[in-house]
């Protein structure tokens, strides 16, 4: 008699747990890499949102930026494990499409985070930074900060063909007031005021090399656009060694905590801050909504971009370093 | 005429010099600023990290091995030495020694796995590449290490030779190359490296401890990766956990372009320096010309095929 009640209670608990687990929405998050602090933060945001709202989060990534096969494998494994929503930052905006189509045909909702697929409607929805706008903001800032001086621009880009690299670069040109391709273009715009374009691969040491080479070509440079904050740090190193760090305005994109600290140190003049945590938590919420109501997220949602600058300039709205530090991603 | 031919180095060794000369001449003619002391000194600084890694890679390739872990081990070394100095407050020389100790340890691991467990170097170093990467990311917490003592970046300083600033790190790189070149040519131990690469079985039968030579080569390569770590820190001023991701292929490219045979037993280590410089020259020259970096990659690929073809042809001719 006394043994039966605990047994029955245990059985009921297990059944309830199983039932709850069956109802628990499973969301898969696939980032480009495991190690880029941007994606680490995205994963943390997703995990927090999943915990808070009662979803189960599976996470995975490619090996390196550009590793499409790794992302395809992760997606297949997650769907097999019961994920009904996949959030993905696509490493290759075209190559991932067949895998996404297969997933959607199975009734899985696929949302792109941070960068779109090409074409963008291959996914149900897109939660991303408007990278073009991020470029426009820093272009506007650089123009205003430069004032009346003739512009001598150097751009340190990512590498050829990457949509995010193109959008930020072209947005920068547009914001600066120069002729630029529109947001859909994957080609880097050129202008007579841009004296040198080099690839930094978003890397500190390669950014330094790229800046050194461009300095040889254009020693009179006074504005440097950089694809992200590590490249900007490398560029600053090169300029400092050449004694030109005080004469050049460096602008960047990302808003990571290290980058914002560099704005505070005067290494970067202004940076466009983006919000990976927000992308991730919005994605998880959309996944829960889909699991509970069958309603899919759709369209493009801009997760916002804020200009962070130590010295505000007239006509361009920006927030200060203190605000930037509160909102930054990465380790503070 | 035959006496002259026997005195000239074979085409495989002259090739890299010719390629470098052609590239430099081309850029000197098509751009204004390529052929200046300042620009050339800059190129040497840009290649010094890969250049020193390539010394270790050359030694390993001479034994018919290969090392895919070199870049990641270099990154680990730079994180260890910078964190020991910045976080633990160790004096710079001790922190640097610890960093080099860690990279040498990885070399030992590679060497033991190749000789004791008899695993192919490609597979072994593919594994240690991943392990080194993971340890680097975990130990650094994916954070860049800043606020380093000045003594740690000392090799990044320059001194003037007749109006041109030459970096101390560059001088170190050249001295290391000359030292290894001499060691490989003139000492018994150095010549054993060639022997093991040429014909390990015959070498063993002659009484040379091939396993010891191999392990020694991998450990020595690890030491060079550690020195490269220090140069990377001196150049960028920080410990970067995301460094070293492409340096393995860059180093192998430098070694191949330099005329060393991937099949082992043949090659001059100075060629790897030329190979590294050629890549730097291409990158610098094409940027000065305003040409997209895609073409740099294309030209590098073509040169690699040419270099390996020349090596194959001269092997056939030697028989």
Image (tube, rainbow, N blue to C red):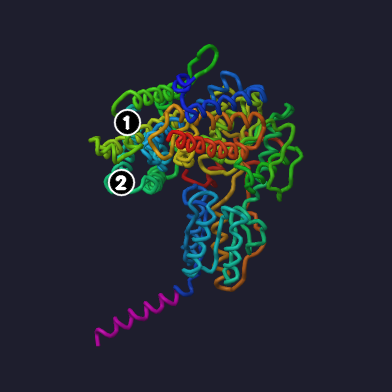
Is A17 one of the magenta-colored residues? yes
- Residue B113 is tagged as 2
Q: Which circle's residue, 1 or 2, is located before the other in the chain?
A: 1
Is A259 one of the magenta-colored residues? no
Q: Is residue B115 visible?
A: yes
Asked which secondary structure carries label 1, the reply is helix
Q: Is residue B317 above or below residue B154?
A: below
The residue range painted magenta reads A1-20
Crowd around label 1: few <14 · some 14–19 · many ≥20 (10 Å): some
How many numbered marks appear? 2
Q: Is residue B83 visible?
A: no
Based on the displayed image, in which of its 4 quarters is residue A283 positioned? bottom right
Q: Residue at x 51, y 38 (%)?
A: B309
- Residue B97 is tagged as 1
Query: How far apart are the alpha carbons under marks 1 and 2?
Result: 24 Å
Based on the displayed image, in which of its 4 quarters is residue A15 positioned? bottom left
Extreme residue in the bottom direction: A1
Q: Position of residue A196 (x, y in %)?
A: 66, 32
The chain that hosts pointer 2 is B
Q: Position of residue B15 (x, y in %)?
A: 52, 29
B275 or B18, nearer to the observer: B18
Quadrant where the N terminus of chain A lies?
A: bottom left
Q: Position of residue A136 (x, y in %)?
A: 69, 43
Q: Is residue B20 above or below residue A204?
A: above
């Amino acid at each position: 008699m006394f043994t039966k009640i605990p047994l029955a209670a245990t059985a009921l608990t297990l059944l309830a747990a199983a039932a709850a687990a069956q109802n628990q929405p499973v969301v898969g998050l696939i980032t480009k890499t495991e190690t880029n602090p941007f994606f680490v933060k995205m994963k943390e945001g997703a995990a927090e949102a999943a915990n808070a709202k009662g979803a189960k989060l599976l996470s995975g990534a490619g090996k390196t930026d550009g590793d499409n096969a790794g992302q395809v494998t992760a997606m297949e494994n997650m769907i097999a494990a019961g994920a009904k929503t996949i959030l993905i930052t696509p490493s290759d905006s075209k190559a991932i499409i067949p895998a996404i189509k297969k997933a959607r045909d199975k009734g899985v909702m696929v949302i792109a985070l941070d960068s779109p697929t090409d074409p963008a409607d291959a996914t149900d929805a897109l939660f991303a930074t408007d990278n073009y706008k991020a470029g426009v903001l820093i272009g506007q800032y650089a123009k205003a900060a430069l004032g009346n001086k003739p512009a001598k621009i150097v751009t340190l880009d990512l590498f050829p063909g990457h949509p995010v690299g193109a959008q930020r670069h072209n947005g920068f040109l547009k914001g600066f007031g120069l002729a630029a391709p529109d947001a859909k273009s994957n080609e880097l715009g050129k202008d007579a005021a841009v004296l040198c374009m080099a690839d930094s691969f978003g890397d500190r040491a390669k950014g330094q090399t790229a800046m050194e080479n461009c300095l040889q070509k254009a020693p009179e440079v006074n504005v440097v656009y950089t694809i992200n904050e590590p490249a900007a740090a490398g560029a600053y190193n090169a300029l400092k060694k050449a004694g030109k760090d005080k004469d050049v305005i460096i602008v960047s994109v990302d808003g990571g905590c290290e980058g914002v600290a560099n704005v505070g140190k005067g290494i970067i003049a202004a940076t466009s801050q983006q919000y990976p945590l927000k992308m991730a938590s919005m994605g998880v919420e959309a996944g829960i909504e889909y699991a509970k109501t069958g309603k899919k997220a759709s369209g493009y949602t801009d997760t916002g971009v804020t200009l962070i600058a130590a010295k505000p300039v007239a006509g361009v709205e920006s927030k200060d370093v203190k605000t930037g530090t509160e909102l930054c991603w990465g380790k503070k | 005429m035959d006496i002259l031919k026997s005195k000239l180095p074979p085409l495989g060794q002259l090739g890299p010099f010719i390629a470098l000369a052609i590239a430099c001449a081309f850029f000197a003619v098509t751009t204004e600023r390529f052929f200046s002391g300042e620009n050339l000194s800059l190129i040497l600084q840009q290649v010094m990290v890969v250049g020193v890694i390539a010394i270790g890679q050359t030694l390993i390739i001479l034994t018919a091995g290969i090392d895919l872990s070199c870049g990641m081990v270099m990154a680990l070394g730079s994180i260890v030495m910078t964190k020991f100095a910045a976080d633990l407050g160790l004096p710079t020389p001790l922190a640097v020694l610890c960093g080099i100790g860690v990279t040498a340890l990885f070399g030992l691991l590679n060497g033991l796995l190749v000789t004791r467990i008899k695993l192919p170097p490609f597979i072994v170093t593919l594994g240690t590449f991943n392990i080194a990467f993971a340890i680097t990311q975990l130990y650094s917490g994916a954070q860049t290490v800043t606020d380093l003592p000045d003594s740690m970046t000392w090799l990044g300083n320059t001194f003037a030779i007749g109006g041109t600033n030459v970096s101390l790190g560059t001088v170190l790189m050249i001295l290391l190359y000359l030292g290894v070149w001499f060691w490989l040519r003139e000492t018994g131990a150095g010549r054993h490296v060639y022997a093991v690469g040429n014909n390990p079985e015959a070498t063993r039968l002659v009484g040379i401890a091939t396993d010891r030579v191999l392990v020694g080569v991998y450990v020595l390569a690890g030491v060079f990766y550690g020195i490269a770590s220090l140069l990377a820190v001196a150049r960028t001023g920080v410990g970067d956990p995301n460094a070293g991701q492409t340096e393995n292929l860059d180093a192998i490219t430098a070694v191949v372009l330099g005329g060393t045979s991937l099949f082992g037993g043949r090659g001059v280590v100075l060629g790897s320096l030329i190979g590294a410089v050629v890549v730097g020259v291409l990158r610098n020259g094409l940027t000065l010309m305003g040409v997209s970096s895609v073409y740099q990659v294309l030209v590098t690929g073509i040169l690699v095929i040419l270099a390996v073809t020349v090596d194959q042809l001269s092997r056939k001719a030697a028989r």
